[in-house]
Amino acid sequence: MPLRPLRPVDGYLPIEDHGLIGDGVTCALVARDGAIPWLCLPTFDGEPFVAGLLDAERGGTFAITPVGLREATQRYVPDTGVLVTELHAADGVLELTDCLPLRSGADLSEPVPAGRGEVLRTARVLSGSVEVDVRLAPRDGVRVRSELGAWRIQWPARADLDLLLWCSHPLTLTGDGAIAGRVRLGAGERLTVTLQWSGQTQLRAREDPQRLVDQTVAAWRGWSGRLTYGGPQADLVRRSALTLKLLDHVPTGAVMAAATSSLPEGIGGERNWDYRYTWVRDAAFTSYALRRIGMDEEAHAFLAWTLRNVERRGGVDIMYALDGQPPATEWLDASLSGYRGSGPVRWGNGAARQVQNDVYGELVDVAYQWVRSGGAITEPLWMALRQLTEQAITHWRTPDNGIWEIRDAGRPFTYSVALCHVAVDRALRIAALQGLPHPRERWQREADLIRTSLLDQAWDADRGSFTEHLTSPGSDHHGGLDGSLLTLPLRRLIAPDDPRMVATTEAVRRHLDAGDGLLYRYLHTESPDGLKGTEGAFLLCSFWLVDNLAGQGRLEEATDLYDSLCGRANEVGLLAEEIDPSTGAFLGNFPQAFSHVGVITSGWNLERARAAREGTA
């Protein structure tokens, strides 16, 4: 990738100036200036050890930075989660290799931890001479003491963690509580820094860092060699698969919605959320995408984990933390100012307590995918699924907070009603496939009623399209347009080439247009959500548009749009939740699993549509 100067805004590098590293238990972001401004320990949804991404002054950092840094570029070692940053200073070039190293012989397809519980950072001078600053400044006050040539760190937020920092060159404790040092390196010379939290003293012998990098590369390539995809944008689809794997909590099968919390959907607004959790909604979309490209084990594990949570808790929650419980109560952290001063910083997620009627269909669709992949439905699980189906039948008319989790008065959202139909339809299919007892005639009548009501009451004849919510009986008040309407064909409510869906696709494309193929998910002026400020264009909605165009046989339009969306990935192939239409900058949590699901699914759908047209399917 070409070198680019570093251009901080308000003291922060752009969101897109970061890469992701991880080990299947937690992850970190590495900035293009050599800093790690985000690392949660010991898991994805754990406490942030460094959170400079959310407060450049008080959030902390773990940096290896050349003095006089001018420009830099990043790349992944191909088909791995090992990140390389090339940093150009006035008198030389420093190459920084970052990873969360994996065990020798680790198999990332196995549902067991593969990591060593450490961050490994190795730097070498490619040319010239470089003066290098090393600095670890945790977010919270810590107690530090020197121990056998390393630094033992006691972190009050997680006193149970045994943290140790080691550097190949001398570091000292500074007056502000950081561990730091400066060293000049000549061409070919190296520097290594590790931060360990495994608690395994036998790992503290100074192992050859290159060997650790090599075995990590081998483990990643062993996993990525299983990927099967030959469609458009193959390199980015593979990188998207690797990104989902980096967000995959291997021991459970859960997939994080994103790596971060509270990155703003609009600078200066309040639309900042904690996304380090797993949504049931995401499970259905993500599992579908994973299976399309050969990630069968991950899809199977994700489905099994989600269904275990339902069976264990006797019902379905909207989202889960890694322990299978709902996220902690949402709270505002006044100690951090937020990315570019865009507070509030939130931990936990209040949407977990909302009414979202689509969750019934999301979960039963997960179970249907499980059955289609050869899984069996146990009697307790079938009892839970039957209960969810009955709840969908009971509640499909009830207003809710919808797929976008509005913080305003509920409405009978079209997407939610559609997923209540999915719940009953998929339950009927599961029962038929596995010979399970169920009230077939009644469920079929209810499924037909929900679908007929949706197609009738969500249709606005004056507008010539479906709208975001159903009208009340006797009312002609329709809602605005909503990007989730584009999922109706994807969830088998209506054919993509049905004239009503073709008209809706065009209406959504026109009315929610953010320019250059980008779509807003809705307009706040006509679809109130109870929040202040604005947000960017929502990437997944544009990928749904690709799927609709492909389903309508408009393959050239679909391909052009798909290529333009893929072209918005950063230099290492990562995407955020949203795009600022005026600048192209990333907004929202990063990297966002849903956006990478869109890359995979739309690419696969395009390839399938092409094969069908050419008669090779």
Image (cartoon, rainbow, N blue to C red):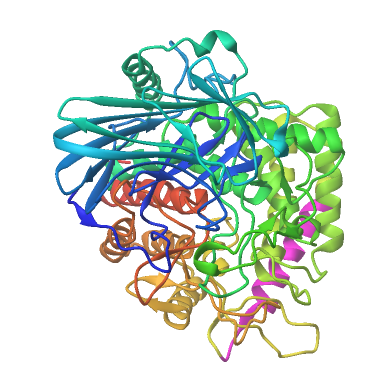
User: Percent from the top left, x then y, of residue 287?
Assistant: 55, 40
46 to 222, vertically: above or below: below
Would residue 601 be visible to someone looking at this image?
Answer: yes
Q: Quadrant of residue 517?
A: bottom left
Drawn side of residue 256 relative to residue 221, left or right: right
**Residue at 43% across / 12% down in the picture?**
206
331 to 591, vertically: above or below: below
Would residue 426 be visible to someone looking at this image?
Answer: no
Residue nearest the observer in this picture, 141 or 355:
141
Residue nearest the observer in this picture, 168 or 217:
168
Q: Quadrant of residue 493?
A: bottom right
User: Percent from the top left, x then y, of residue 400?
Assistant: 77, 68
**Residue at 86% across / 51% down in the picture?**
390
User: Percent from the top left, x then y, of residue 608?
Assistant: 35, 46
Magenta stretch: helix, strand or loop mostly: helix
The quadrant the C terminus occupies is top left
Q: Quadrant of residue 134?
A: top left
**Residue at 71% across / 89% down in the picture?**
477
Report the magenta residues as a range.
Answer: 442-462
- Residue 542 counted in the magenta span: no
Drawn side of residue 545 relative to residue 488, left or right: left
Q: How many marks?
A: 0
Residue nearest the observer in this picture, 56 or 3:
56
- Residue 443 counted in the magenta span: yes
User: Percent from the top left, x then y, of residue 278?
Assistant: 65, 45
Residue nearest the observer in this picture, 119 or 362:
119
Drawn side of residue 377 relative to residue 140, left or right: right
103 to 548, vertically: above or below: above
